[in-house]
Amino acid sequence: MYCQECGTKAADNTKFCAECGRKLPSATDIEERPKQMYSFKTAITDYFKGMISESKLRDMVRKKQIPHVKMGNRTLFSGEALDAWMEEQERISTGKQNPLKLVR
């Protein structure tokens, strides 16, 4: 679970963020919340916090390197899909393989 205020990762059983002290949402709060969807601009500003350029994100979409959904001429990004993608990228970069992928 991540703090929605500062983005710090917190243990699932923690009620308050160790970094900023804000109350973390409970599991029921998370389940009731609608899925967060991002456009190109909001993905860059809100999700990636300006750490990636719009041209880089568009290039990744064009090469199908990042999860996205096309709706007509709009491209949308699911917050849940981006979270899962980021975790997978972290596993790849640290050399930790997903145990499910090892089973054949």
Image: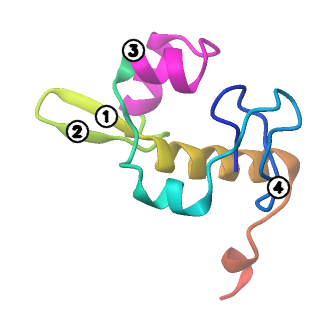
The reply to whether dot 3 and dot 4 touch (C-beta < 8 Å) is: no
The residues bearing labels 3 and 1 have C-alpha atoms spaced at a distance of: 10 Å
- In this view, the mark in front (3 or 4): 4
The reply to whether dot 2 and dot 1 touch (C-beta < 8 Å) is: yes
Q: Label the magenta part by its dominant secondary structure.
A: helix
Which circle's residue, 3 or 4, is located before the other in the chain?
4
Which circle's residue, 2 or 1, is located before the other in the chain?
2
Which circle's residue, 3 or 1, is located before the other in the chain?
3
- In this view, the mark in front (2 or 1): 1
Q: How many residues crowd mark 4 within 10 Å: few (<14), some (14–19), many (20+)?
A: few
Q: Amino acid at mark 2?
A: Lys
Question: Which residue corresponds to mark 3?
Answer: 41
The residues bearing labels 4 and 2 have C-alpha atoms spaced at a distance of: 34 Å
- In this view, the mark in front (2 or 3): 3
Where is residue 76? Give x, y as percent: 31, 34
The answer to whether 50 appears left or right of 56 in the picture is right
- In this view, the mark in front (4 or 1): 4
Q: Amino acid at mark 4?
A: Ala
Residue at left 81%, top 38%? 17
Quadrant of res 67: top left
Task: Out of 68 and 79, give the one closest to the viewer.
Answer: 79
Which circle's residue, 2 or 3, is located before the other in the chain?
3
- Highlighted range, magenta: 41-62
Compared with 31, 40 (above or below) is: above
Question: Which residue corresponds to mark 2?
Answer: 70
Question: Which residue corresponds to mark 1?
Answer: 76
Q: How many residues crowd mark 1 within 10 Å: few (<14), some (14–19), many (20+)?
A: some
- In this view, the mark in front (4 or 2): 4
The residues bearing labels 4 and 1 have C-alpha atoms spaced at a distance of: 29 Å
